[in-house]
Amino acid sequence: MIQWAVWRRLRTAFRHEDIIAVQCMALLWLPSITLVLLTLNFSSSVIGRDFSTFWMAGHAGDNPYGLLAEFVRERGRPSPVIYNFTYPPPVLFLTKLVAELPLTFAFLAWNCAGAILFYVAAKPYCPKGFPAVLAVITPAAVVNDNFGQMGFLVGALWLFAWRGSNLCAAALAIKPQIGFLVLVKLVRDRRLTGATAWGLAFVAISTIAFGLNIWSDFIRHIIAFQESYVAKSPIVAWLFQSTTPYVGYGLFGWICFASAGNLLLARNFNVWTAATATFLISPYGFHYDMTVVCLGFGIFCFESWDELAWYEKVLVGLAFAVPALVHFGTWFASPILLGGLWVQSRVRPSRGAFGSTKTLAEAQ
């Protein structure tokens, strides 16, 4: 009886939004972040992380695609390591920039700048009472920080593109396997021409800066990479990093999950459902790419807490934790994300800009 009276007093002392935020943190953030910290391999060395490939591409001269592995060995790497730079030539502007700093400082600056950019992009999407800082401490965000990957950058581009930026929509071509569903948004909003113009501008500027051969080198490299990806077994590490169906379930499984994802997406197409469906439809994507997905489930849970049944809260919580759960095997990711997308597609929150079919711009 005493405990119940204390609980009632606390409920009247705090706003309803504050209580829901605490409940969401207890269900989503605390368990997931704890699991990430327990399962990630933290190392004091930046060498060998994904970012080191990005940084070394800035030092690779005129051929970052064909000579990168040799370049690494020339600098005294004791054993051959595969540094596979697969980004299109416009990304070389960024690699040249970060290469101006020592590797460790560049790694820290890259993560800090990415977190700030993602925070700025995410803040307009955060409903009243939702702490915007949580956007940069999701499971995907923590994993991205450890790898030094592009999860913050690509996530920010996604969020900016959804709010009307044609430049950011075009820039998502740096990771087309993650940004492809923005095309649907561009067509719906009649912005495809503007985004295409920006894309052609990126191609022209990078060609002027790095030469026409850089594009042929990139195309040959990416074709060879895709052929090896389809023809051979996936890299062993991907079995504990990939969050898309193809790696764990093969071609037939991928088709099944992609078909189900498309059907659910057709029921409710918005910035969050499209982000989740991307990891069911795309042939490959990784835990560090899921910054928008995690943020989406966090905001969805906050906005929909009163409408969700207990099992729906569990599904959303598991989907939020996928970047941590994939450590136990890629096979867990797709069924969980499909369940999370099912909840997202059927429950329309009573609060927030995405509680209706309106876009954020229309809601404002």
Image (cartoon, helix red, strand yellow):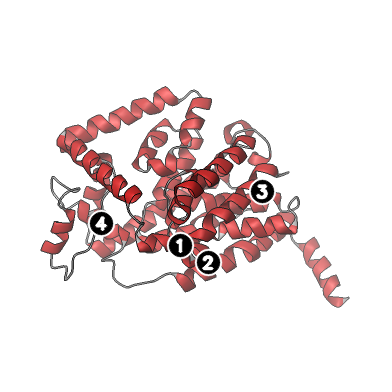
Front of the two marks 3 and 2: 3
Given the current orientation, which residue lies at the most extreme right position?
1
Q: Quadrant of residue 177?
A: top left
Question: Looking at numbered disc 1 in the image, what kind of residue is underneath it?
Answer: Val
Q: Nearer the viewer, residue 94 or 149?
A: 149
Query: What is the distance, in whole Å, between disc 3 and disc 2 at their CAs?
Result: 22 Å
Question: Which labelled disc corresponds to residue 343?
Answer: 3
Q: Nearer the viewer, residue 240 or 91?
A: 240
Query: Where in the figure is residue 320, as x and y percent of width and height?
Result: 57, 57
Front of the two marks 3 and 1: 3
Residue underneath mark 2: 33
Residue 244: tell me if it is visible: no
Query: What is the distance, in whole Å, between disc 4 and disc 3 at their CAs?
Result: 38 Å
Q: Quadrant of residue 194?
A: top left
Residue underneath mark 1: 142
Q: Residue drawn 71% across and 60% down?
A: 19
Residue underneath mark 4: 53
Residue density around tag 4, few if under 14, some if 14–19, many if 20 or more, within 10 Å: many
Query: What is the distance, in whole Å, between disc 4 and disc 2 at their CAs?
Result: 26 Å
Q: Secondary structure at mark 1?
A: helix
Question: Looking at numbered disc 3 in the image, what kind of residue is underneath it?
Answer: Val
Q: Nearer the viewer, residue 156 or 283?
A: 283
Residue density around tag 3, few if under 14, some if 14–19, many if 20 or more, within 10 Å: many
Q: Secondary structure at mark 4?
A: helix
